[in-house]
């Protein structure tokens, strides 16, 4: 018996009310969904067993991945209150769901936008996916629906569906949500179903990005290039950027040898550090005396697509711009400025220059027409006056925070209007294509406007940050958290988004990552996402060390070109990986301890590796051991190992 898909729409049936907290839409019984959607021969096993749970955070920087059966999600110990903005679903908790529960009940699993439950037995998997599809556009006049959050109760085997529409005044007959539910038998079927749902016409969905496509197969878009952030961070100037621009095309770095030498499109992005301040989007004259138009022109003359970082929705209270536009800053119910987050460079510690917690920065009131006009002028300047064509729009979540909007309404409505303005310039005045990368971005309310998007927290040249790990901060900047979300969201790639996993590291200076960790990041980004960005110093390229490692990575990229890879979690940090053709198998270990796996358990998409198969090492970080007739693999911490299957 084939699986069945369910589609449900939900409408407001009251006489008119304004939401003061997240609204509960409906409640599903997991067992009833299994009965309706799962093939007959697997229903009883699903009803009788607990499940792996996949849930995503509401925006780019939140956790995205699986939780094992009988386990719950970690709760953040809030050492920095402002950081909760980065991963906590906005608005007040829904009253009905928590009526008889502690609102901090960690036994409720939670995920936004798209979730699934997965049962695994005898090398087979069943996925039961629940997807919010209310923002899939049927036509240009379609209005966005509020973003959805799912709460899953393992004990009662129920799923509650809620929406964030705080401030929304409903009218009878208003559509609240649209949910689609389906089952899939393996990773590839899951991904293909998501692609058909969110990108039924890939040309329409992702066609605007073709000018950046480095892939031979136009059906899959892969973007590549260099950015300044993960080497210089905010300490940039004209001299440094000019030297990097020259070095990128002359030293044997990955971007030159893989993209530039092969005549593939290449982005050169200038990240944070060029601007006078948040909201004050003109260049610092002491850092960039040529100005931004000349910088973009210089990048273009080198043959690269000029890119620029901007954070349009946030503002530093201390800037002259903020002082002149205090009325533009979003307020809460007590008329206090809404804090968007914490950054030591973007806010004062205390005093008249800091109306909130130390080092807070703030967000704009997107309901105001004058704010919208300001955003329109900003992008006109960046795209047409200066000439940048790859625009990284960051910290977009601030546009979805709860506040007392001047013109009433709910954040999601004003956010939709604002991002349409930000991204409306698909070509510049010269007729050249323009692309936008969304980052720090609410997934569900953004995927229509940002087909190219970050899908995890920032990476880092260190595997993890110990104190952030101990307080269980899910949006922490680290290679570990980044890898977990890149893998977790991989089934979205080429369907919901062209997934940007952040940068690869191949350097040997200013870094604590070892070779196996760097190889892990390089291969996960290539096999499970669709943007290869680099941030290492191209000027001081070390031929002996970095050149050797670059060559290794490039050889593997060429070997795996055109292969479609999938994965199945063994635990939340351990993954069986395989390609669709059934010619490669392998294992990823993000954990801190060695992992032993039997050869027979190295799974393929269609089952297990045949006992007689010979596994030829492609890349291996670990060892093989034979005990009696059982062959086992021991995989090192923070590693990827891949084998070619030879019968």
Image (tube, grey):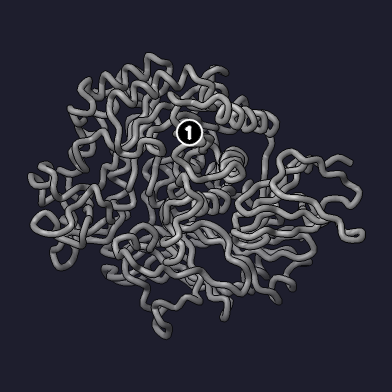
Front-most of residues 394 and 619? 619
In this view, the residue in front, 552 or 137, is 552
Q: Identify whether 168 is placed above or below 458.
A: below
Image quarter where the C terminus lies is top right
Circle 1 sits in a helix, a strand or a loop, which is it? strand
Could you tell me residue 358's position as x and y percent?
A: 21, 59
Image coordinates for residue 104, horizontal then vertical, percent = 40, 77
Q: Where is residue 640 in the image (x, y as percent from the top left)?
A: 66, 47
Q: Nearer the viewer, residue 494 or 11?
A: 494
Number of marks:
1
Left or right relative to 59: residue 635 = right
Q: Where residue 306 sits in the image (x, y, percent)?
A: 37, 25
To which residue does mark 1 refer? Answer: 534
Q: Which residue is drawn at 38% across and 33% down?
A: 228
Query: What residue is at 78 percent from the left and 43 percent from the top?
Result: 582
On screen, residue 254 versus residue 443, left or right, reads: right
């Amino acid at each position: 018996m084939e699986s069945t898909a369910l589609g449900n729409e939900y409408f407001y049936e009251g006489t008119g009310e304004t939401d003061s907290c997240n609204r509960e839409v409906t409640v599903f019984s997991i067992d009833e969904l299994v009965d309706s959607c799962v093939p007959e021969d697997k229903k009883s096993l699903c009803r009788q067993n607990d499940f792996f749970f996949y849930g995503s955070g509401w925006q780019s920087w939140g956790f995205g991945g699986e939780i094992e059966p009988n386990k719950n999600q970690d709760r953040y110990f809030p050492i920095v209150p402002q950081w909760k903005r980065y991963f906590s679903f906005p608005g007040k908790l829904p009253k009905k769901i928590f009526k008889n529960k502690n609102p901090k009940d960690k036994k409720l699993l939670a995920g936004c936008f798209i979730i699934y439950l997965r049962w695994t037995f005898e090398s087979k998997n069943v996925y039961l996916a629940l997807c919010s599809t209310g923002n899939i556009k049927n036509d240009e006049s379609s209005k966005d629906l509020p973003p959805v959050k799912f709460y899953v109760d393992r004990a009662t085997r129920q799923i509650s569906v809620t929406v964030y529409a705080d401030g929304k005044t409903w009218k009878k007959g208003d559509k609240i949500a649209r949910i689609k539910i389906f089952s899939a038998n393996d990773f590839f079927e899951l991904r293909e179903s998501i692609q058909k749902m969110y990108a039924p016409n890939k040309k329409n969905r992702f066609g605007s990005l073709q000018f950046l496509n480095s892939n031979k197969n136009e059906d899959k878009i892969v973007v590549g290039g260099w950015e300044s952030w993960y080497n210089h961070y905010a300490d940039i100037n004209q001299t440094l950027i000019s030297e990097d621009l020259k070095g990128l095309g002359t030293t044997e770095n990955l971007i030159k040898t893989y993209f530039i030498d092969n005549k593939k499109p290449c982005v050169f992005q200038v990240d944070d550090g060029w601007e006078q301040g948040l909201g004050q989007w003109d260049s610092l004259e002491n850092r960039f005396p040529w100005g931004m138009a000349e910088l973009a022109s210089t990048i273009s003359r080198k043959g690269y697509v000029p890119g620029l970082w901007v954070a349009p929705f946030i503002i530093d209270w201390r800037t002259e711009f903020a002082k002149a536009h205090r009325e533009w800053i979003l307020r809460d119910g007590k008329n206090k400025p809404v804090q968007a987050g914490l950054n030591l460079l973007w806010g004062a510690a205390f005093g008249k220059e800091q109306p909130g917690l130390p080092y807070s920065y703030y967000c704009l009131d997107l309901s105001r027409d004058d704010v919208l006009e300001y955003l329109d002028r900003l992008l006109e300047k960046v795209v047409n006056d200066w000439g940048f064509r790859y625009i990284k729009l960051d910290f977009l979540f601030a546009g979805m925070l709860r506040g007392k909007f001047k013109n009433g309404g709910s954040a999601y409505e004003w956010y939709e209007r604002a991002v349409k303005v930000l991204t409306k310039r698909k070509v510049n005045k010269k007729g050249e294509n323009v692309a936008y990368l969304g980052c720090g971005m609410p997934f569900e309310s953004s995927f229509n406007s940002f087909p190219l998007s970050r899908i995890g927290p920032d990476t880092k040249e260190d595997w993890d940050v110990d104190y952030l790990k101990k307080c269980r901060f899910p949006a922490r900047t680290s290679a570990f958290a980044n890898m977990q979300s890149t893998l977790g969201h991989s089934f979205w790639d080429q369907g919901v988004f062209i997934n940007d996993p952040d940068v690869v590291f191949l350097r040997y200076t200013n870094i604590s990552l070892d070779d196996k960790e760097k190889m892990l990041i390089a291969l996960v980004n290539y096999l499970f996402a669709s943007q290869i960005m680099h941030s290492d110093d191209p000027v001081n390229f070390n031929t002996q060390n970095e050149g050797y490692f670059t060559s290794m990575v490039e050889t593997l990229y060429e070997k795996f070109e055109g292969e479609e890879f999938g994965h199945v979690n063994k635990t939340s940090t351990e993954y069986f990986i395989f390609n669709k053709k059934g010619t490669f198998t392998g294992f990823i270990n993000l954990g801190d301890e060695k992992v032993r796996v039997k050869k027979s358990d190295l799974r393929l998409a269609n089952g297990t590796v045949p006992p007689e198969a010979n596994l030829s090492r492609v890349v291996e970080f670990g060892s093989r051991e034979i005990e009696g007739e059982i062959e086992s693999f021991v995989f090192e911490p923070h590693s990827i190992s891949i084998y070619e299957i030879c019968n």
